């Protein structure tokens, strides 16, 4: 077997050899599968070079082949579950594109101009229109935005897609969001002139065969490149008090009785100051804001910033860049930084409370030592005794590689109904043709005629009882001709209610001066707030200037105290496998002496 870089054009191979010592395992094996034209799932731990493993062959073809007509220019579609990850990939593509271009031009040839563009919910309307008129070579988007593109006139730019990259596929495969995405991928395949080659990127998961079936759908063989050896991790559980049952003696202020926080904050601060760059993971946005504010107060400086989904994208990007540049010593983050975003040289990950799963724990600790071959270091700090036991169970599972299994939902008909309305809003379908497209999606491979008929009955106004009579029909089903099409207003309905992420009733927070978006607040917090009050969002203080039916207009109030923003969310849950492991550990501890039990937990 020859040098894998010989598969590429000379300019691509020369750039890679100059930039890297050698390909990683996932790159070596993945490129051979991609170059052979096979659908492929690449599984590898954080920091293994998966993104370049997926993209380099595509970039090589884009820079080697003649530039097509503008209407057929979009040839690579990258789908990311996180908007932040989409922007991270956009930044990371610049280096190989510039490097390959330089190699081509140094050889005396003319390099084509390769354009990459991002289309998410944050993309301005004018930028979207420009994208439709002048499609990019590489389109970077999210599952929901892909659905919106497919349900609009802009879908024509996707007809030329040849490579489809789905990143962090494990994070959606086991959810209804993944089922929704699987139908969008089949709609894309039905639209394109040639079947796109599917490339999936996943963290270490099990069983990979299930994730591969989700990626490929029915009737497509998917090669699995399993480079999923877990990264070397150094993880410890640290309890900042001697006895979690006796906390009063650890309260220095005399104001917060029976609280462990007076012991947690100084320890977090100490660990952050001992390292160059740290991420503190928590399980809620409110806790992220609270910890960030308190750490800055203790440090008497802007040492850390909060990072979560209710902070505007521009603010999050700025915060991420500050950490990478070293102007911030740390971030206090929710799951927004859990997936494969490159945060640069992070030395340490701190986790306050048990993470929601073993897989999440591995992903989070993997943010430290992100580069190939580096050790990932993490410290877990539980808040109470029950949390200590769960944290110990999670850490034990992490060190033993006992990742929770992935189970793809089967036949979520509510998701199917939404996609059927979208499909019929764009085209008239033969029922059997629509059924064939739907069944190619793995979650719907076993869709029976009666289930499909029930969905079409409901959408066309034929209900099983009078209780549904107030629901308006959304499609017209001609049972004689065997066709279905959308009613008036079906497209508007489809694009105003996209995806499976529920509407939380959030207010956007905008600056009075220029309308720039700062973030979003829970409607309950807005209801309790008044003009002139200050609050903390993103570890920055803002003064409320005006409250409208959908917005909170603010001005900066640096250095002033303010109440911590809060959000209502679903109660935390845990996977069944983690619950079983936790129960097993509790039974083991009960059978041990107190000293032996304490040693077991440590």
Image (tube, grey):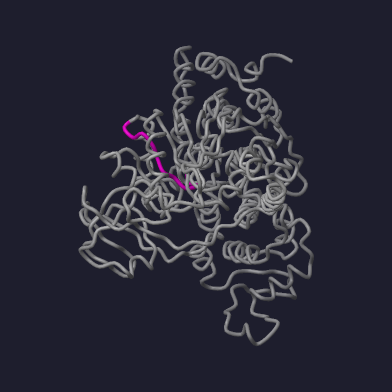
Q: Answer with left or right where residue 286 lies relative to residue 464.
A: left
Give whichever of 152, 364 is nearer the camera: 364
- How far from the left and from the top, in percent, is residue 296? 30, 42
- How far from the left and from the top, in percent, is residue 540? 29, 48
Please report the residue visible at 22 percent of the width from the left and 66 percent of the height from the top: 531
Queried whether the magenta region covers residue 254, the answer comes back as no
Span highlighted in magenta in the image: 327-336
Residue 123 in sight: no
- How far from the left and from the top, in percent, is residue 294? 33, 47
Please report the residue visible at 55 percent of the width from the left and 26 percent of the height from the top: 375
Q: Which quadrant is the C terminus positioned in?
A: top right
Q: Which quadrant is the N terminus positioned in?
A: top right
- How far from the left and from the top, in percent, is residue 75? 56, 38
Q: Answer with left or right where residue 125 lies relative to residue 145.
A: left
Give whichever of 327, 588 is nearer the camera: 588
Give whichever of 503, 285 is nearer the camera: 285
Vertical placement of residue 270 versus 592, above or below: above
Please report the residue visible at 60 percent of the width from the left and 66 percent of the height from the top: 421
């Amino acid at each position: 077997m020859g040098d894998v870089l010989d598969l590429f054009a000379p300019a691509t191979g020369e750039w890679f050899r100059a930039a890297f010592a050698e390909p990683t395992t996932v790159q070596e094996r993945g490129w051979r599968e991609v170059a052979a034209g096979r659908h492929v799932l690449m599984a590898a731990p954080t920091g293994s070079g998966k993104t370049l493993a997926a993209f380099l062959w595509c970039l090589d073809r884009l820079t080697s082949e003649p530039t097509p007509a503008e209407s057929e220019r979009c040839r690579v579609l990258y789908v990311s579950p996180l908007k932040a990850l989409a922007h991270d990939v956009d930044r990371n593509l610049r280096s190989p594109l510039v490097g390959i271009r330089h190699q081509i031009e140094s050889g005396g040839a003319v390099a084509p101009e390769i354009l990459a563009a991002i289309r998410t919910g944050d993309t301005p309307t004018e930028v979207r229109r420009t994208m439709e008129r002048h499609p990019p070579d590489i389109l970077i988007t999210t599952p929901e935005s892909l659905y919106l593109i497919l349900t609009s006139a802009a879908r024509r730019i996707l007809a030329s897609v040849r490579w489809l990259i789905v990143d962090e596929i494990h994070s959606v495969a086991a959810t209804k969001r993944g089922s929704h995405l699987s139908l969008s991928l089949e709609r894309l395949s039905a639209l394109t002139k040639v079947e796109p080659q599917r490339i999936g990127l996943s963290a270490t998961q099990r069983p990979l065969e299930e994730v591969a079936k989700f990626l490929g759908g029915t009737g497509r063989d998917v090669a699995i490149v399993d480079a999923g050896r877990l990264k070397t991790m150094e993880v410890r559980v640290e309890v900042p008090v001697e006895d979690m049952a006796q906390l009063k003696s650890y309260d220095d202020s005399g104001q917060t009785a029976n609280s462990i926080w007076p012991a947690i904050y100084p320890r977090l601060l100490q660990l952050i100051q001992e390292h160059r760059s740290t991420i503190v993971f928590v399980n809620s946005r409110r806790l992220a804001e609270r910890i960030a504010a308190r750490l800055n107060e203790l440090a008497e400086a802007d040492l850390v910033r909060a990072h979560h989904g209710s902070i505007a994208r521009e603010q999050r990007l700025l915060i991420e860049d500050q950490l990478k540049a070293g102007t911030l010593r740390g971030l206090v983050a929710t799951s927004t930084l859990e997936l494969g975003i490159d945060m640069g040289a992070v030395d340490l990950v701190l986790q306050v409370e048990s993470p929601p799963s073993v897989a999440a724990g591995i992903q989070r600790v993997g943010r430290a030592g992100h580069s190939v071959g580096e050790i990932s270091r993490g410290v877990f700090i539980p808040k109470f005794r029950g949390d200590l036991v769960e944290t110990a169970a999670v850490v034990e599972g992490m060190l033993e590689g006992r990742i929770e299994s992935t189970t793809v939902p089967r036949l979520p008909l509510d998701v199917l109904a939404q996609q059927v309305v979208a499909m019929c809003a764009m085209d008239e379908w033969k029922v059997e043709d629509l059924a064939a497209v739907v069944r190619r999606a793995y979650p719907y491979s076993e869709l029976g005629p009666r289930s499909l008929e029930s969905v079409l009955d409901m959408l066309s106004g034929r209900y099983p009882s009078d209780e549904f009579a107030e629901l308006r029909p959304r499609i017209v089903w001609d049972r004689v001709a065997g066709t279905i099409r959308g009613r008036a207003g079906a497209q508007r309905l489809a694009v105003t209610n996209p995806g499976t992420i529920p509407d939380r009733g959030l207010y956007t927070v905008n600056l009075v001066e220029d309308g720039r978006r700062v973030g979003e607040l829970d409607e309950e917090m807005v209801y309790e707030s008044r003009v002139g009050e200050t609050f903390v969002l993103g570890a920055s203080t803002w003064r409320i200037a005006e409250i409208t039916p959908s917005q909170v207009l603010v001005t900066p109030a640096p250095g002033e105290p303010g109440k911590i923003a809060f959000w209502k969310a679903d109660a935390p849950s845990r996977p069944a496998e983690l619950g079983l492991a936790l129960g097993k550990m509790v039974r083991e501890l009960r059978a041990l002496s107190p000293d032996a039990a304490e040693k077991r937990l440590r």
